[in-house]
Amino acid sequence: MMYLQVAAGLVILLVCGELLVRGAVALAERFNISKLIIGFTIVAFGTSAPELVVCVQAALEGSAGIAIGNVVGSNIANILLVLGAPALIYPLTFDQKSAFRDSLIVAGGAFLFTAMAWMGVIAFWQGFVLTATLALVIYAAYRRAKSEGEDAADEALEEYEENMPKTAWVSSLFVLVGLLGLTLGARLLVHGAVEIATAAGVSEEIIGLTLVALGTSLPELATSLIAAFRRHGDVAIGNVLGSNLFNITGIIGVTAMIQPLESPSQILHFDVMIMLAASILLIVLFYFKRPIGRSLGAFFLLGYLAYIASQFFGMSGVQSMAALAQ
């Protein structure tokens, strides 16, 4: 039953998150809102809505390990898995200047999050600082994109405009169903994850870092794989960098303002360091203009598999895996 809860929760989150974004984009366009504003607000926040609702739900139920584990694990998965898998299809090339700049911003956000997490509890004021930081970054990016024209915004919204609801009432229904579905999906996912952790004898942090994080990273993985098939490496890389920044600033920030998050020492001493190391690795790659080719993609994937294995075999390995299989 607990596995069905998790599976159902993930499916509902994915479907309803998509409905929410498409309905909100359609309503915004009906009101003649600039595509740049739609791209930097509605689409950006909407695509992160599943992770946000999951983290808030987990925090309210006293499962801070799942909330923080979801964010840290998602960021690790985004770099090692979501960039590694598409690179096996086609090497990911990119604009060096923008990729290097954005990777520095993401790494800066990661270090800010880490500093606050090491204080023991991420409280309201820390959540406000993280959220304000994200708002400043978005504003700066919007101003930069505005000076360069709306071509990038047209390309970013092209996918959503292909299957957009045609009437205002259908668009509103999409938004309503999306919001209600996200709440239901998050509740099922969190409850199922907690039950799995209890039954398997592993910590909630491990479930958050692996099962929940991987599940909520599936939309980014799908987007990056499609981008690789279309040979749009810059889209895949931008998708990962944007998602990671939203995770550690916006999602943690908003969640902490609703419910303070106690930082699990287990995550601070190992997983956060892996996240920072992966972020720094991207900076080095972008600085030296090194495309992410098949060999590097395979290295990333092997690194992610090793990381997942370490979550279970680092404690009481064989027993935990056996318990999960039952």
Image: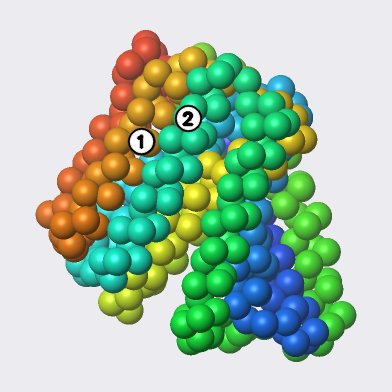
The reply to whether discs 1 and 2 touch (Cβ–Cβ < 8 Å) is yes
- Pinpoint residue 123: horizontal percent, then vertical percent: 69, 26
Label 1: few (<14), some or many (≥20) within 10 Å?
Answer: some
What whole-number distance in Å separates the C-alpha atoms at marks 1 and 2?
9 Å
Q: Using the rendered view, name the quadrant where residue 197 is placed.
A: top right
Residue 101 sits above or below residue 214 on the image: below
Inspect the image, locate mark 1, and give the three-letter code of the amino acid beneath it: Leu
Q: The N terminus is located in which quarter?
A: top right
Q: Using the rendered view, name the quadrant where residue 173 is placed.
A: bottom right
Residue 228 sits above or below residue 197 on the image: below
Depth order, front residue of 212/11: 212
Residue positioned 50% across, 50% down in the render: 245
Element under disc 1: helix
Q: Using the rendered view, name the quadrant where residue 42 is placed.
A: bottom right
Q: Which residue is mark 2?
A: 114
Residue positioned 31% across, 24% down in the render: 310
Query: Number of callouts in the render?
Result: 2
Q: Which residue is mark 1?
A: 276
